[in-house]
Amino acid sequence: MPRMKAAIFVEPGRIVLDEKPIPDVGPRDALMRITTTTICGTDIHILKGEYPVAKGLTIGHEPVGVIEKLGSAVEGYQEGQRVIAGAITPSGHSYACLCGCGSQDGPGTKHGFKAMGGWKFGNTIDGCQAEYVLVPDAAANLSPVADNLGDEEILMCPDIMSTGFAGAESGGVKIGDTVVVFALGPIGLCAVAGAKLMGATTIIGVDTVPERLAVAKKLGADIVVDFKKGDPVEQIMELTDGRGVDVAIEALGTQGTFESALRVLRPGGTLSSLGVYSNDLKIPLSAFSAGLGDNKIITSLCPGGKERMRRLLNVVASGRVDLKALVTHRFKLDDIEAAYDLFGHQRDGVLKVAITP
Ligand SMILES: NC(=O)c1ccc[n+]([C@@H]2O[C@H](COP(=O)([O-])OP(=O)(O)OC[C@H]3O[C@@H](n4cnc5c(N)ncnc54)[C@H](O)[C@@H]3O)[C@@H](O)[C@H]2O)c1
Ligand SMILES: [Zn+2]
């Protein structure tokens, strides 16, 4: 049986490059040959054991590649075609999908819903930090890529861009809104770009890393706040004349940033949460207006599926948003352990790494 290289979760603290059989292709699957992929902040949660996955699983959920083999029932594509698939691969036919929340897809479950069930790559099935990945429900998930778009230009579409933009979309950002984004990692930076696309006219970015604050300004932040130079809540309330923001996007996944996001909302404002949390959250009463503040708290898992990917590819192709600055480092798949080390420790100004088999 032909084999391939893959980055495999062994135990907390260890993801190693090893060999696995190239998967067999079922009727509704497609085998994708990976040309470029990357590492997500969520993979670091997995590496640290903060988000549990099965031992032996191939990690990675951001595939750019070429169709190597199509399942017998998949129509409308050709082998050899360049494609991406989202980090989230909804089946397209579950109750959750037909309800418009394919990220919570549960096709085999009694009611058709499963929390986070649409996130399969590198979570419940083998992921794409490998030479090949099997794409389930290929007809719902493969999105063709135009020849003039380079791999690195579209590398953010499967997850980072989809998730960051979803922070602004789920938050219901409106023209003229004031929006704050807590944490300017790749996800928060894309939330800034998404808020700008949605029409926010004052965007405040919160972080402390100078390079990240600078990229946030390039992508649309009007003001940046360094959380180490004073209480960010006070700084934001001052910047908004005590009014607070219309939408606060949380892009880290900690009690501190969640709470700050809640405290800077104007009455009736929306907290749009993107972070992956590894502990229970508390809602402080002083930020909760006795439950009568008309506030909304909304959470989003990265939207996936081929229609979402088609739209994001169009955003890139149209030049509305240019995320090339997010790819700061490049590694061969053979050196993925070094890539994890650099990315996990956020050394050398890293934002995203491009990994090529
Ligand atoms: N919802 C989803 O579908 C989804 C998808 C992908 C990633 N995520 C999650 O999004 C989160 C962000 O991922 P990332 O890769 O962008 O993160 P990252 O780790 O690259 O960046 C985090 C940033 O937070 C900053 N930071 C630390 N403490 C802060 C504070 N108190 N206030 C403001 N900023 C602070 C750091 O300086 C850093 O720049 C992670 O929890 C990740 O797991 C969620
Ligand atoms: Zn991710």
Image: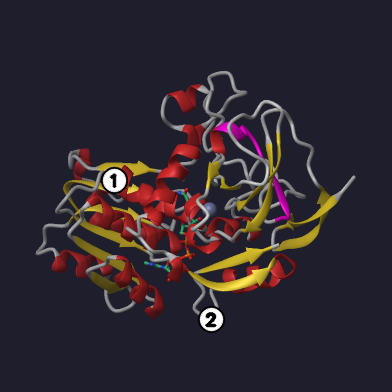
Q: In screen coordinates, is 156 left or right of 291? A: right
Quarter of the picture containing the N terminus is top right
Amino acid at circle 2: Asp
Query: Among all residues in the image, which is located at the extreme right?
Result: 1
* Residue 94 in view in this figure: yes
Q: Residue 171 shows which numbered tag?
A: 1
Q: In screen coordinates, is 121 left or right of 282? A: right
Q: Nearer the viewer, residue 37 or 348?
A: 37
Q: From this view, report whether residue 216 is shown above or below residue 262.
A: below
- Return the x and y of residue 307 as percentages of the image width and height: 45, 38
Magenta stretch in the rendered image: 130-139
Dividing the picture into quarters, in which one does residue 135 lie?
top right
The residue wearing badge 2 is 348
What residue is shown at x 34% (from left), y 62% (from top)?
A: 182
- Pointer 1 or 2: first along the chain: 1
Q: Whole-Å distance between the Cαs marked 1 and 2?
A: 33 Å
- Return the x and y of residue 312 as percentages of the image width and height: 42, 49
Query: Among all residues in the image, which is located at the extreme left?
Result: 241
Amino acid at circle 1: Gly
Q: Nearer the viewer, residue 231 or 307?
A: 307
What residue is shown at x 65% (from left), y 59% (from top)?
A: 47
- Return the x and y of residue 16 as percentages of the image width and height: 76, 62
Q: From this view, report whether residue 305 is shown above or below residue 6.
A: above
Q: In screen coordinates, is 254 left or right of 14? A: left
